[in-house]
Amino acid sequence: AQKVTQAQTEISVVEKEDVTLDCVYETRDTTYYLFWYKQPPSGELVFLIRRNSFDEQNEISGRYSWNFQKSTSSFNFTITASQVVDSAVYFCALKGERGSQGNLIFGKGTKLSVKP
Amino acid sequence: DAMVIQNPRYQVTQFGKPVTLSCSQTLNHNVMYWYQQKSSQAPKLLFHYYDKDFNNEADTPDNFQSRRPNTSFCFLDIRSPGLGDAAMYLCATSSASGIGADTQYFGPGTRLTVL
């Protein structure tokens, strides 16, 4: 079975703080893809990153960074120097090599509130 | 800019009155998806089209139907909306091949209210 767990339901920080959103996944597939999406209050799901199972390099994009560790089945997301505009629900998702084309498994999401 | 467009952004319908939501894309992706998202929940896949092949999720109610007349457009029809169908409906697209295959790109969503 495939599963994505985002244990943090809600996080509240003050602007300029660093914050890490946790994501733990389960899959028996050897090839799989992991994603992070941002959903601001407007409702649109915005694609942030995709990582395949063979690429464990960490990635940095501006204030965003991602730490992929196969040994712990985790794909954590860190926002450095958070800003009010980072307030949103963040979803981690998994797609395995088996299953249908549409088989994107979402976590339940973490709601991040950044206060000024 | 290439994108996924959904119309309308907000839709109000009456209990039992059929409603159609539309989605179009300029990404030329061959896969299109419809998701239902209720408050404080993750998106739930209803069905998807791989080219013209329709793939229904096992637990999608018969009340929900879809049409894809061409590559660019996909419609979600709710034949007899109930109060429980009030939700955000998200359309997404992906390419089945090439760099970035399987990454789903979402539209802004249509928020459906059922009175």
Image: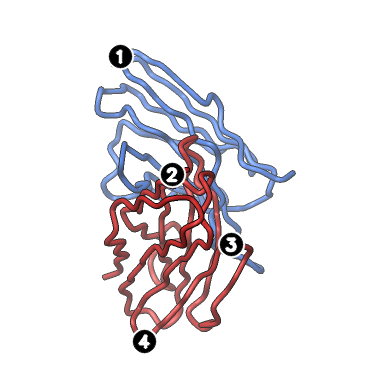
Amino acid type, label 3: Arg
For disc 1, the marked residue is B115
Q: Colour of chain A?
A: red
Colour mapping: by chain
Neighbour tally class for label 4: few under 14, some 14-19, many 20 plus, Cα within 10 Å: few
Query: Which marked residue is nearer to the observer: mark 1 or mark 2?
Result: 2
Quadrant in the picture for residue A30: bottom left
Amino acid type, label 2: Lys
Q: Distance of mark 3 from mark 2, alpha carbons?
A: 17 Å
Q: Earlier in the sequence, mark 3 or mark 2?
A: 3
Residue name at image x 45 percent, y 79 percent: A31
Residue A96 location (% of width, % of height): 41, 71
SS label for mark 1: loop
Q: Are marks 1 and 2 in contact (CB under 8 Å)?
A: no
Q: Distance of mark 1 from mark 4, alpha carbons?
A: 50 Å
For disc 4, the marked residue is A71
Question: Mark 3 falls within which chain?
Answer: A
Neighbour tally class for label 3: few under 14, some 14-19, many 20 plus, Cα within 10 Å: few
SS label for mark 2: strand
Neighbour tally class for label 2: few under 14, some 14-19, many 20 plus, Cα within 10 Å: some
Q: In screen coordinates, is B5 left or right of A16? A: right
Q: Are marks 1 and 3 on the same chain?
A: no
Residue name at image x 56 percent, y 35 percent: B23
SS label for mark 4: helix
Residue name at image x 36 percent, y 86 percent: A71
**Tag of residue A10:** none
